[in-house]
Image (cartoon, coloured by chain):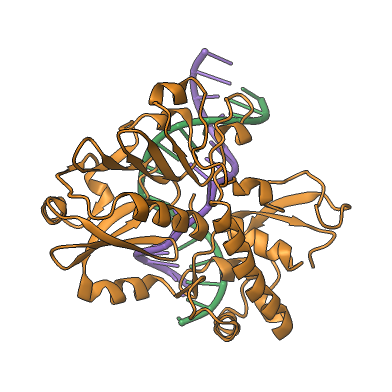
Chain colours: A orange, B green, C purple
DNA sequence: CAACAGACCTGCATGC
DNA sequence: TGCATGCAGGTCTGTT
C-alpha cells in the first residue's frame, strides 16, 4: 500500500483538484472507517470545503475551511482515494484493478460529494484505513503520539537519524527504518530499497553500523524517496502480480480523461505521459529469483525480517 | 522505553 | 472443484 511517495503524489494531485469545492453531501457507507462519531463527522464536513492538504509520513491532513478541524486520512494497506470529475477519474493509493474502475464499488467506505457530480471516494478493501476529525489545537499531540519527523521534512537531518538509530541499537536496520515513531514515511518497499542501495542486509543489527554507514543510509533515504515521488510512486498493477489479467498501466497515481467504458475495454491511457511507474525503478523489492542488478551475480532472495516480506542480495549486501 | 507477538480485515494465489 | 493455508505496500495494543 501507499508509503510516503505514494501519499505525497496523492496529496499533490488532490490539492490540484479538490480545494475550495463545497462538500454538499457526505456519505458514510462503513461507520467503522470513521474514527469518532459519524454524526459529528457528517455535520462538520457538510457545507465545508478543503482549504489545503498536508502530509505527515503516510498520514494525509486536510485543512478544513470552517469549524477549526483537520481531517486526517490514513490509507493503511489497501486504502485508495479516487476523485471523480465529470471527465476523469483520478486514483491514488492501493493498486488499481478492474473493479476499481467504477466508483462507487463494493470497497467504497466514504464519499464526499461536491457539486456537479464531482466526488471523492475513499475505498478500502481491508478496512484498516480511517478518516478522523481532530480539532486544530489537538493536531500536534495526535500526530506526535504516532510519528517522528517526516522523512522529507527539513527537520530530518543526518544528526537526527544518527540519534534515532541509537535508540534502536539492538533491532534490525529494517525494523528501525519501518518504525514510524522515529522516522515517518518509510514502508516495506522503500526499507528494502534503502538497504539495497547502501549494501546492507536488512537483518543487520543497528549497533553494527558505523557512523559513516548511517550517513550513507541518510542520503539513500532522501534519494530513493525523492526519485519515487518524481515517478509518481509505486503501485503494482494486477498484471504484474498475475499474468492472467490485462495490464492497466497505472502508476501510484493514475488519471484518465477517457470515459469509464473505455477503461473497462482496456483502452486506458495516461493523461500525463511524463509520469512513469516507479515499479520499473525498484532495484530489489518484488524481484525474488531475479539476478541482482548491481553485482550481476547474486539472485534476489526473500525472507522475513521485522515480520515483513524482505528482499535482498546475499552477494552484495553485508 | 525497547523489542516483539498478536490483532485488525478481506481477497487472492497456491497446493493438496 | 473445494478447502486450507499463506501472503499482502500498515500500525495499534499488550506483554515482557
- Front residue (pair A17, A310): A17
Q: Can residue A202 be seen from the camera position used here?
A: no
Residue A286: x and y in percent read 66, 46
Residue shown at 80% from the left, 52% from the top: A293
In the displayed structure, B14 sits above or below A299; it is: above
Residue ID at (35%, 36%) = A107
Side (left or right) of A302 relative to A277: right
In the rendering, at what x and y percent does residue A210 appear?
Answer: 73, 83
Nearest to the observer: residue A88 or residue B13:
A88
Q: Is residue A150 left or right of residue A302?
A: left
- Image quadrant in which you'd find residue A120: top left
Name which residue lies at 54% across and 45% down: A235
Q: Quadrant of the C terminus of chain A?
A: bottom right
Image check: A197 left or right of A118?
Answer: right
Q: Position of residue A264 (x, y in %)?
A: 45, 22
Residue A100 screen position, x and y as percent: 41, 33
Q: Is residue A111 above or below residue A8?
A: above
Question: Count of labels shown?
Answer: 0
- Look at the image and tell me whether residue A152 can be seen: yes
Residue ranking furthest to the right: A297
| In the rendered image, the vertical position of residue A165 relative to residue A176, given as above or below | below
Taking A182 as reference, is C10 above or below it? above
**Foreground pick, A203 / A114:** A114
Q: Which residue: 59% across, 45% down?
A: A277
Amino acid at each position: 500500500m501507499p508509503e510516503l511517495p505514494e501519499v505525497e503524489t496523492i496529496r499533490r494531485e488532490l490539492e490540484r483538484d479538490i480545494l475550495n469545492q463545497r462538500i454538499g453531501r457526505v456519505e458514510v457507507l462503513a461507520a467503522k472507517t470513521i474514527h469518532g462519531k459519524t454524526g459529528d463527522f457528517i455535520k462538520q464536513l457538510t457545507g465545508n470545503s478543503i482549504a489545503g492538504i498536508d502530509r505527515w509520513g503516510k498520514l494525509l491532513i486536510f485543512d478544513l475551511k470552517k469549524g477549526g478541524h483537520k481531517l486526517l486520512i490514513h490509507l493503511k494497506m489497501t486504502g485508495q482515494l479516487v476523485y471523480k470529475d465529470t471527465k476523469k477519474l483520478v486514483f491514488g493509493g492501493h493498486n488499481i484493478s478492474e473493479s476499481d474502475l467504477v466508483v462507487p464499488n463494493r470497497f467504497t467506505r466514504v464519499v464526499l460529494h461536491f457539486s456537479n457530480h464531482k466526488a471523492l471516494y475513499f475505498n478500502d478493501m481491508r478496512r484498516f484505513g480511517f478518516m478522523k476529525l481532530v480539532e486544530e489545537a489537538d493536531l500536534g499531540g495526535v500526530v506526535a503520539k504516532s510519528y517522528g519527523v517526516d522523512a522529507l521534512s527539513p527537520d530530518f537531518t543526518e544528526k537526527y537519524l544518527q540519534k534515532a538509530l541509537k535508540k534502536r541499537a539492538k533491532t534490525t536496520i529494517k525494523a528501525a527504518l519501518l518504525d514510524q515513531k522515529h522516522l515517518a514515511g518509510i514502508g516495506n518497499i522503500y526499507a528494502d530499497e534503502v538497504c539495497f542501495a547502501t549494501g546492507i542486509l536488512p537483518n543487520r543489527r543497528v549497533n553494527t553500523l558505523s557512523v559513516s554507514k548511517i550517513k550513507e543510509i541518510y542520503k539513500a533515504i532522501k534519494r530513493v524517496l525523492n526519485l519515487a515521488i518524481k515517478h509518481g510512486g509505486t503501485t503494482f498493477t494486477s498484471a504484474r502480480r498475475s499474468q492472467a489479467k490485462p495490464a492497466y498501466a497505472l502508476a501510484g497515481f493514475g488519471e484518465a480523461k477517457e470515459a469509464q467504458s473505455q477503461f473497462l475495454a482496456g483502452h486506458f491511457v495516461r493523461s500525463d505521459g511524463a509520469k512513469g511507474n516507479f515499479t520499473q525503478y525498484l532495484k530489489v523489492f518484488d524481484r525474488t529469483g531475479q539476478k541482482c542488478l548491481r553485482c550481476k551475480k547474486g539472485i534476489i532472495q526473500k525472507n522475513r525480517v521485522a515480520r515483513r516480506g524482505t528482499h535482498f542480495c546475499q552477494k552484495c549486501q553485508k
